[in-house]
């Protein structure tokens, strides 16, 4: 017997009610999951964790935070980890027989973090406030650096709306007004004759908007999309041309007429016979050698607070660099809009620092810092920096030295930042106390490259000032250590070694590399200085492409993938603006097979150079023995009695060129230097 069952369908109202119930249940479930996640991410105290009451001893200089936590985990049996944002942080820790919980609590203070419970154990993470403060400080400092650049961008875009000939005339009139009443530049001959100096006009920086490159930049910026503006403020280079080239910004045909008008900026203002003759020469030359195309490269230079540019004229038989006669004044003293010292983060660390009265009463700081009889002061283990070329130590080196002479339990953040700028911080001044040592060596945070320090009983905690910049610009530690290990084994670093390091470096690293401070590492950083762009491009190639380039001496752009071709152009333009490139013309000999364009040429070859031994300062390798001998003679005049000898050294020299257009290439070279003792 069968049953006929009528399908019962819910009404529309019932469907709405069911949907509301299901949504409500889903919302409750989501709230529950979020609440569980929040509870799991809440900060916890480690004081009640029995296993972390065990005593631990750690004596490490510049140890990576994950490695430090792994070591404490091994000794206590408690799983301790660090979040990804802290994975690259380093610490200096010299403690003996302290509870693990005491140590971990102070580590959290130094990294501005908190401990959170996980399924496996506990994780150290930066607090939300710390992350926000760090981002705000980076933004404030960046805005201070970019004040001049933002003003320049505004002026260039505004003036680019006007006819170019009008700007040239205005610049000449303003310059004429500025020079009226000023005495003429003259040359006095030995016979008493006065000869007026006739030269090319120089534009002051406040009239640089009349310069051709800045006028073109202003017109280009006016047409930028939001994506292009983002790339511009990130510092990415842009290339523009009157040539129809893929991936370039187009310059209008009128740019060639503006180039002719730009010649008038260089014409002498006076009306003497010499000045009239010079004007005629310059105008005839411009007519005889007309510009056929213009190439323009520009990018934001955040460190200098300006826009860097290079512009080239393609002429019938050559490519001629455009010689700027004005320009933005860079690295000027600018009144910052935002004072970092007034930020809540800076103020928090100021309050955290032990005050003078409290420090004077701290028993642990009254002990004398003495050296053992016959003990020698440390010798720097780092490669000398190019400038000023002296031995350097980090703050971690100083704290390690202090830890060996006191009973202090020391925890500090650690960076490869040379602490003794200009070699002016000795390890010891005889008879000083720990307190006096700290005041002298661990400089106040208000000074450039200073720090904060805090004393609790026999605990000494130290925090670098400007840590927000040091954290972001620190070299990748694991890569650096691998290169240091190779150097310690007596191996010469290779092109691929430096390329691997360059691949992990950005604009902040480049700016820090360019400063007098830079980095304290145990191998030469010279190949990176001015050659980051080509090294990063080399890192983008696969092993087959690298082998072919070194075998054939040339790598055509046609052999590259689309992504590698973009990297080629970016590296070329970045090198033009920020690198140690030099532009030159070249012409192929008759019958010579021309190289493909565009392309990269590269060659490695052994080269003999000369090193000066026994000098008080580190001197770069000399290219010729004659130059080395002349330098020795000069050194002996102000280093009398010092024995300075010349030692031949074989280096591997890397020479490369970006072949971009007919008659235009950008070339550079750097040396791979053998480790000391080889």
Image: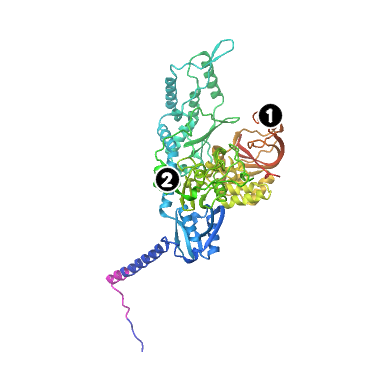
Mark closest to the chain's N terminus, 2 or 1 = 2
Q: Is residue 640 visible?
A: yes
Residue 153: % across, % down: 43, 36
Q: Check residue 570 in the rendering and tell me which mark sits there, or answer none.
A: none
Q: Nearer the viewer, residue 299 or 18?
A: 299
Classify residue 564 as left or right of residue 607: left
Residue 223: % across, % down: 43, 39
Crowding around mark 1 (Cα neighbors within 10 Å: few <14, some 14 to 19, many 20+) is: few
- The region drawn magenta spans 6-19
Classify residue 619 as left or right of residue 255: right
Nearest-to-viewer mark from 2 and 1? 2
Residue at numbered disc 1: 633
Q: Nearer the viewer, residue 34 or 127?
A: 127
Q: Secondary structure at mark 2?
A: helix
Q: Nearer the viewer, residue 2 or 107?
A: 107
Write the residue at 52% across / 19% down: 279
Residue 33: % across, % down: 39, 66
Query: How far separated are the C-alphas under marks 2 and 1?
Result: 54 Å
Count of picture labels: 2
Q: Is residue 560 visible?
A: no
Q: Secondary structure at mark 1?
A: helix
Tag 2 and tag 1, C-beta contact below 8 Å: no
Residue at numbered disc 2: 357
The outermost residue toward the bottom is 1
Write the residue at 49% across / 27% down: 262
């Amino acid at each position: 017997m069968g049953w006929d069952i009528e399908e019962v369908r819910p009404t529309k109202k019932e469907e709405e009610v069911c949907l509301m119930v299901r949504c409500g249940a889903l919302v409750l479930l989501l709230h529950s999951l979020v609440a569980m996640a929040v509870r799991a991410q809440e900060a916890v105290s480690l004081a009640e964790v029995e296993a972390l009451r065990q005593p631990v001893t750690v004596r490490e200089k510049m140890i990576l935070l994950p490695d430090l936590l792994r070591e404490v985990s091994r000794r206590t049996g408690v799983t301790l980890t660090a979040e990804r944002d802290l994975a690259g942080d380093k610490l200096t820790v010299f403690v003996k027989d302290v509870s693990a919980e005491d140590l971990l609590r102070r580590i959290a203070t130094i990294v501005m973090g908190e401990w959170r419970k996980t399924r496996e154990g506990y994780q150290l993470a930066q607090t939300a406030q710390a992350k926000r403060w760090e981002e705000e400080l980076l933004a404030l400092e960046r805005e201070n650096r970019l004040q001049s650049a933002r003003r320049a961008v505004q002026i260039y875009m505004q003036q680019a709306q006007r006819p170019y000939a009008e700007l040239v005339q205005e610049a000449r009139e303003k310059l004429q007004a500025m020079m009226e009443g000023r005495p003429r530049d003259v040359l006095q001959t030995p016979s008493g004759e006065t000869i007026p100096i006739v030269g090319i006009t120089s534009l002051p920086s406040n009239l640089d908007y009349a310069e051709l490159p800045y006028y073109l930049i202003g017109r280009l910026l006016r047409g930028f999309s939001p994506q292009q503006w983002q790339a511009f403020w990130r510092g990415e280079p842009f290339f523009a041309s009157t040539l129809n080239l893929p991936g370039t910004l187009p310059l209008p045909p009128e740019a060639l007429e503006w180039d002719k008008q730009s010649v008038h900026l260089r014409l002498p203002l006076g009306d003497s016979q010499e000045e009239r003759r010079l004007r005629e020469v310059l105008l005839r030359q411009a007519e005889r050698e007309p510009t056929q195309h213009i190439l323009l490269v520009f990018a934001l230079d955040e460190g200098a607070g300006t826009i860097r540019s290079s512009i080239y004229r393609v002429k019938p038989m050559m490519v001629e660099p455009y010689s700027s006669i004005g320009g933005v004044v860079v690295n000027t003293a600018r009144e910052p809009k935002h004072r970092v010292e007034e930020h809540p983060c800076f103020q928090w660390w100021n309050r955290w620092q032990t005050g003078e009265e409290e420090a004077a009463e701290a028993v642990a700081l009254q002990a004398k810092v003495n050296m053992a009889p016959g003990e020698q002061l440390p010798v720097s283990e780092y490669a000398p920096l190019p400038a000023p070329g002296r031995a350097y130590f980090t703050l971690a080196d100083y704290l390690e030295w202090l830890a060996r002479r006191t009973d202090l339990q020391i925890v500090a953040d650690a960076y490869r930042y040379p602490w003794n700028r200009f070699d002016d911080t000795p390890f010891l001044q005889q008879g000083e106390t720990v307190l006096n040592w700290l005041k002298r060596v661990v400089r106040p945070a208000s000074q450039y490259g200073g720090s904060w320090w805090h004393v609790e009983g026999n605990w000494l905690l130290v925090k670098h000032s400007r840590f927000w910049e040091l954290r972001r610009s620190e070299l990748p530690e694991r890569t650096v250590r691998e290169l240091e290990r190779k150097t310690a084994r007596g191996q010469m670093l290779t092109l691929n070694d430096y390329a691997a390091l360059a691949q992990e470096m950005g604009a902040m690293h480049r700016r820090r590399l360019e400063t007098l401070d830079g980095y304290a590492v145990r191998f030469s950083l010279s190949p990176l200085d001015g050659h980051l762009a080509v090294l990063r491009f080399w890192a983008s190639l696969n092993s087959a492409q690298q082998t072919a380039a070194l075998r054939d001496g040339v790598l055509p752009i046609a052999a590259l993938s689309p992504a590698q071709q973009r990297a080629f152009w970016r590296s070329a333009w970045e090198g033009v603006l920020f690198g140690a490139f030099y532009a030159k013309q070249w012409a192929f000999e008759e019958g010579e097979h021309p190289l493909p364009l565009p392309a990269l040429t590269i060659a490695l070859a052994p080269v003999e150079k000369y090193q000066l031994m026994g000098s008080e300062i580190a001197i770069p390798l000399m290219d010729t023995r004659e130059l080395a001998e002349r330098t020795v003679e000069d050194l002996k005049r102000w280093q009398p009695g010092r024995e300075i000898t010349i030692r031949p050294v074989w280096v591997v020299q890397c020479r490369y060129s970006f072949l971009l257009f007919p008659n235009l290439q950008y070339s550079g070279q750097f040396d791979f230097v053998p480790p000391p003792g080889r």
